C-alpha cells in the first residue's frame, strides 16, 4: 500500500514547484505572486521507484495581512488530516518567519508524521536558513531545491521506510 504526502507551509516557499516536480505535470498553479493556488490539489507522485499521492496545499491570502489567513489555516488542517505524512517546507532564503511557527504548531498538534525541509537551499546563501529550520524542533531539516531538483535523493531516503 502506498501513502499520501501533503506539502504544507506558508505561501511562496515553493510548495507548488515541488508538487510539479514530483507529479511531472503542471497540475498546480505556480506564480511569482504568493498565494495564487486556491485550493488543495492532488497528483500521483513519482520519486525513483516510489509512487505516492501528493497534496499541494494553498489558500487565499491577503498580501497586506501579516497573519496567517483563516482560510489558509483551514485548508492546511484539511490536508494534514488527509495525509499520512506532511512535508513542511520553509524558505531557506527568507529564513524563519512568524507564520512558519504557526504551521509548526498545527503540524505538531495534528500531523501523523512530519518531515521538515528547507527549500530554495541551492547555494551557500541558504545555509543560515537551513540552520534556522532546526529551531522548529521537528528534526533535522532536509535541504531541497524544488526549482533546481536538488535534494531529491534525500527526500527519497526519508520516504522509503514509509512506503
Ligand atoms: P508556493 O506558494 O509555496 O506554492 O510557492 P511556488 O511554488 O509558487 O513558488 C514561489 C516562488 O519561489 C516561485 O517564484 C518559484 O519559482 C520560487 N521557487 C520555488 N522553489 C525554488 C527553489 O528551490 N529555489 C529558488 N531560488 N526559488 C524557488
Ligand atoms: Mg502554490
Image (cartoon, rainbow, N blue to C red):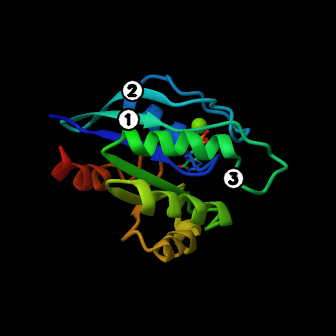
Q: Nearer the viewer, residue 156 or 88?
A: 88
Residue that mark 3 sits on: 68
Q: Earlier in the sequence, mark 3 or mark 2?
A: 2
The alpha-carbon separation of the residues under discs 2 and 1 comes to 5 Å
Q: Are marks 2 and 1 in contact (CB under 8 Å)?
A: yes
Q: Is mark 2 within 8 Å of ligand 2?
A: no
SS under mark 1: strand
Q: Residue at 37% x, 71% y: name it.
A: 139
Tally the marks.
3
Q: Residue at 44% x, 22% y: name it.
A: 25
Front of the two marks 1 and 3: 3
Q: Residue at 59% x, 61% y: name it.
A: 102
Considering the image in quadrants, where does the N terminus appear? top left
SS under mark 3: loop
Residue 44, compared with residue 104, is above or below; it is above
Residue that mark 1 sits on: 54
Residue that mark 2 sits on: 43
- Give the quarter the ligand 1 occupies: top right
Q: Residue at 39% x, 50% y: name it.
A: 86
Q: Nearer the viewer, residue 1 or 45?
A: 1
The alpha-carbon separation of the residues under discs 3 and 2 comes to 25 Å
Counting from the top left corner in percent of width and height, residue 155 is at 31, 52
The alpha-carbon separation of the residues under discs 1 and 3 comes to 23 Å
Q: Earlier in the sequence, mark 2 or mark 1?
A: 2
Residue 138 visible in this rendered orientation of the protein: yes
Q: Could you classify mark 1 by the number of other residues whose Cα lies within 10 Å: few (under 14), some (14-19), or many (20 or more)? A: many
Q: Is mark 3 within 8 Å of ligand 1?
A: no
Amino acid at each position: 500500500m502506498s501513502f499520501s504526502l501533503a506539502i504544507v507551509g506558508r505561501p511562496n516557499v515553493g510548495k507548488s514547484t515541488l508538487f510539479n516536480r514530483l507529479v511531472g505535470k503542471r497540475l498546480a498553479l505556480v506564480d511569482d505572486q504568493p498565494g495564487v493556488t486556491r485550493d488543495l490539489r492532488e497528483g500521483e507522485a513519482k520519486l525513483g521507484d516510489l509512487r505516492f499521492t501528493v497534496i499541494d496545499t494553498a489558500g487565499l491570502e491577503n498580501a497586506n495581512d501579516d497573519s496567517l489567513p483563516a482560510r489558509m489555516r483551514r485548508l492546511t488542517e484539511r490536508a494534514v488530516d488527509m495525509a499520512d505524512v506532511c512535508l513542511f517546507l520553509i524558505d531557506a532564503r527568507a529564513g524563519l518567519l512568524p507564520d512558519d511557527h504557526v504551521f509548526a504548531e498545527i503540524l505538531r498538534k495534528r500531523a501523523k508524521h512530519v518531515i521538515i525541509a528547507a527549500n530554495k537551499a541551492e547555494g551557500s546563501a541558504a545555509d543560515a536558513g537551513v540552520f534556522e529550520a532546526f529551531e522548529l524542533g521537528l528534526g533535522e531539516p532536509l535541504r531541497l531545491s524544488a526549482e533546481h531538483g536538488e535534494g531529491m535523493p534525500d527526500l527519497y531516503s526519508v520516504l522509503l521506510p514509509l512506503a
